[in-house]
Image (cartoon, helix red, strand yellow):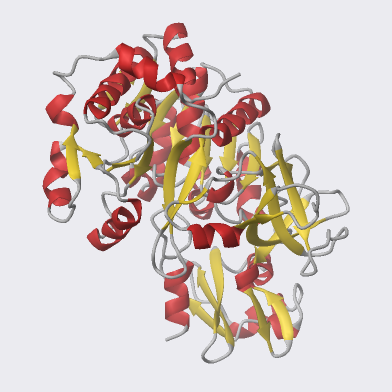
């Protein structure tokens, strides 16, 4: 039984030593080279007497970042990816919460990091070529490691402005990866096209599927997502067969009708998660790439990436919501009403999760941890934590989970309780817009629709079409066309920015 992710790479490096593990814009690295590089990093950290500590990694998405993560785990510590493009103030706020003894970077980013970082900085360029691996010390460290030890911490935005460091265990990742391998039949022949940045938890699936199976991981350059034609060419050039992308990337390609001119020739598995995937855009993909397998994954960072999934097989109309499906193996979900009772079929409630996928908590923040990870109210007999996601869902008559929206996106408008996500689904169902987002202007008490479209839409025509899907009280009060939907660093629609615009 696997207890530490380093066991994945040890096995894979023996089976496929000379196979390419990771390829980025600057080159490639084999599995045996990856393991050696990881052990060099581990030896350096052990020499510095860093033990059972968070180690921050200030590197761009690259093979160097991946072997740094591996080396940190080989040394018995856990890694924290930092975004080299983030404002210094945000990186500083993470470092203040984290209090790491060292930060790993490279020479190219040393000066920018040194300008504000007060911690010890370890530069890969300085030691990668002249450090002798200490196998004995690495082995000794790993003998005391167990599956509930932390593997990484990813910082998400906090409501107070201070980022929250979600601490994930080896067991959570192992459960997730073992489930994914069985479910999607991943082996060494798969070529994964990575989109998610490493400070976004979707990247966990890409990295550790590679570690565990011998699949090759292609780190797709970020700028290619701006040029869809070049993106498709890149997929074909590298024979990419598996992608796990945020929906916005798929939506954008559908809106541009990219498959009218070229198609990805090798794609077999198309997974997506991070936000709602509209059926309007998914139907475009299914029409043009009908042989591919599509899966909608759902889960917050606090439960190790994803806890439910839905294999898309039956037909959906453009205005239907796509189910988030069923629990992943060794995860269980509860739908609890406001009275902490199990919701009936088609009754909305808060999605709560139990199981070993749960995060260990928020780093250096006991108060937030104890609010989010609470005793299961259905269990009065022994301690059992659940995570309250803050997401509203219900189970339909097919026993599929349907995502409704955030508890904090449920508004009360003119006396009615309204889900903003339901309005978005209806707007897309009108076929009048390419993409949209709905927010609430609390100051003026109005529903605000932001949309992208090839031309302005007639308010009269829009309201007439909308009334085919929702009652009058759910119609947006203000309708604003924008040239480009703002995105956050993870590639999702930036609702914070839209809220600021709506509430001006």
Quarter holding the C terminus is bottom left
Q: Is residue 346 left or right of residue 188?
A: right
Q: Residue at x 57, y 51 (%)?
A: 300
> How far across and down, in percent of the image, does residue 480 sit?
49, 79
Q: How many marks overall?
A: 0
Quarter holding the N terminus is top right
Establish if 19 lies above or below 149: above
Q: Residue at x 58, y 90 (%)?
A: 445
Establish if 374 lies above or below 2: below
> How far across and down, in percent of the image, does residue 371 sit?
59, 62
Q: Is residue 278 left or right of residue 365?
A: right
Q: Residue at x 74, y 79 (%)?
A: 467
> How far across and down, in percent of the image, does residue 5 sit?
48, 25
User: 321 and 84: which one is in front?
Assistant: 84
Residue 262 visible, this angle:
no
Residue 89 visible, this angle:
yes
Establish if 258 lies above or below 329: below
Establish if 367 lies above or below 47: below
> How far across and down, in percent of the image, does residue 385 sit?
67, 50
Q: Residue at x 15, y 25 (%)?
A: 127
User: 386 and 189: which one is in front?
Assistant: 386
């Amino acid at each position: 039984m696997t207890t530490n992710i380093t066991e994945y790479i040890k096995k894979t490096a023996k089976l496929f030593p000379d196979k390419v593990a990771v390829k980025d814009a600057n080159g490639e690295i084999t599995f045996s080279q990856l393991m050696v590089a990881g052990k060099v990093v581990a030896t350096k950290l052990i020499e510095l007497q860093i033990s059972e500590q968070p180690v921050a990694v200030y590197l761009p998405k690259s093979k160097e970042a991946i072997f740094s993560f591996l080396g940190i785990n080989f040394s018995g510590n856990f890694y924290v990816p930092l975004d080299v493009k983030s404002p210094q103030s945000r990186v500083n706020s993470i470092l203040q919460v984290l209090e790491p003894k060292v930060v790993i970077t490279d020479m190219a980013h040393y000066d920018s990091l040194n300008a504000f970082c007060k911690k010890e900085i370890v530069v890969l360029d300085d030691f990668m070529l002249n450090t002798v691996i200490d196998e004995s010390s690495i082995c000794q460290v790993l003998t005391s490691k167990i599956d509930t030890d932390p593997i990484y911490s990813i910082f998400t935005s906090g409501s107070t402005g201070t980022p929250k460091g979600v601490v994930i265990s080896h067991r959570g990742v192992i459960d997730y990866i073992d489930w994914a391998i069985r479910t999607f039949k991943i082996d060494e022949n798969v070529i994964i096209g990575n989109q998610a940045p490493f400070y976004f938890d979707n990247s966990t699936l890409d990295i550790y599927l590679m570690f565990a199976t011998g699949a090759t991981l292609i780190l797709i350059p970020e700028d290619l997502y701006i040029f869809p034609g070049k993106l498709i060419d890149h997929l074909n050039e590298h024979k990419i067969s598996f992608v796990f992308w945020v929906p916005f990337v798929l939506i954008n390609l559908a809106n541009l009708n990219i498959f009218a001119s070229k198609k990805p020739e090798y794609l077999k598995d198309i997974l997506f998660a991070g936000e709602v995937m509209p059926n309007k855009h998914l139907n475009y993909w299914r029409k043009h790439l009908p042989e591919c397998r599509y899966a909608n994954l759902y889960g917050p960072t606090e439960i190790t990436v994803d806890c439910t999934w839905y294999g898309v097989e039956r037909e959906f109309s453009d205005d239907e919501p796509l189910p988030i499906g069923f629990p992943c193996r060794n995860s269980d979900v509860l739908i609890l009403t406001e009275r902490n009772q199990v919701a009936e079929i088609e009754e909305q409630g808060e999605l709560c999760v139990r199981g070993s996928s749960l995060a260990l908590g928020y780093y250096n923040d006991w108060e937030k941890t104890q609010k989010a990870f609470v005793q299961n109210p259905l269990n009065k007999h022994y301690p059992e934590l659940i995570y309250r996601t803050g997401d509203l869902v219900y189970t339909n008559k097919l026993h599929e989970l349907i995502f409704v929206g955030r508890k904090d996106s449920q508004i009360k408008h003119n006396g009615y309780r309204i889900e903003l996500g339901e309005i978005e689904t209806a707007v897309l169902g009108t076929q009048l817009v390419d993409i949209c987002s709905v927010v609430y202007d609390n100051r003026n008490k109005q529903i605000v629709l932001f949309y992208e479209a090839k031309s302005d839409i007639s308010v009269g025509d829009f309201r007439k079409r909308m009334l085919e899907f929702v009652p009058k009280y759910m119609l947006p009060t203000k309708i604003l066309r924008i040239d480009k939907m703002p995105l956050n660093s993870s590639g999702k629609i930036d609702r914070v920015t839209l809220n600021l615009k709506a509430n001006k």
